[in-house]
């Protein structure tokens, strides 16, 4: 797992970028001595809002990552604020 902080991106732009990354990885074939290998990634997103604690932000993104994996993997799921 890793995380990235994107400055000056709103939640819609973040989702578009994350989906592009997911799609590019899923469509790439890695060459190995045993042949070509395809991998996929699951991505969880959370967007910083005024007065959002960084611990809460990370927890939300991690929750979305786990939901993405439980929902079939190879997808982007974004935290939806109530």
Image: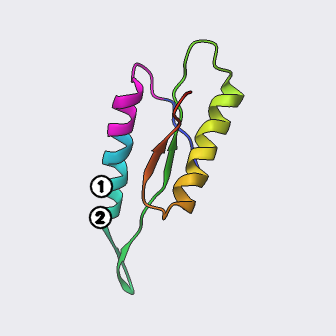
Across and down, in percent, residue 5 comes to 51, 30
Which residue is depicted at the point 39% across and 23% down? 10
- Highlighted range, magenta: 6-16
Q: Are marks 1 and 2 in contact (CB under 8 Å)?
A: yes
Q: Viewed as shown, does residue 48 lie left or right of 35? A: right
State the residue in front, 32 or 29. 29
Callout 2 crowding tier (Cα within 10 Å): few <14, some 14–19, many ≥20: few
Secondary structure beneath dot 1 equals helix
Residue indicated by mark 2: 28
Residue indicated by mark 1: 24
Q: Viewed as shown, does residue 22 lie left or right of 71? A: left
Across and down, in percent, residue 24 comes to 30, 55
Q: CA distance from mark 1 to mark 2?
A: 6 Å
Residue 14 lies, with reference to residue 69, above or below; the image says: above
Magenta span has 9?
Answer: yes
Which residue is depicted at the point 45% across and 58% down? 41
């Amino acid at each position: 797992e890793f995380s990235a902080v994107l400055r000056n991106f709103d939640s819609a732009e973040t989702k578009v970028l994350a989906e592009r990354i997911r799609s590019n990885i899923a469509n790439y074939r890695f060459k190995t001595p045993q042949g070509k290998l395809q991998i996929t990634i699951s991505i969880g997103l959370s967007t910083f809002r005024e007065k959002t604690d960084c611990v809460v932000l990370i927890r939300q993104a991690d929750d979305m990552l786990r939901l993405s994996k439980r929902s079939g993997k190879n997808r982007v799921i974004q935290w939806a604020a109530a």
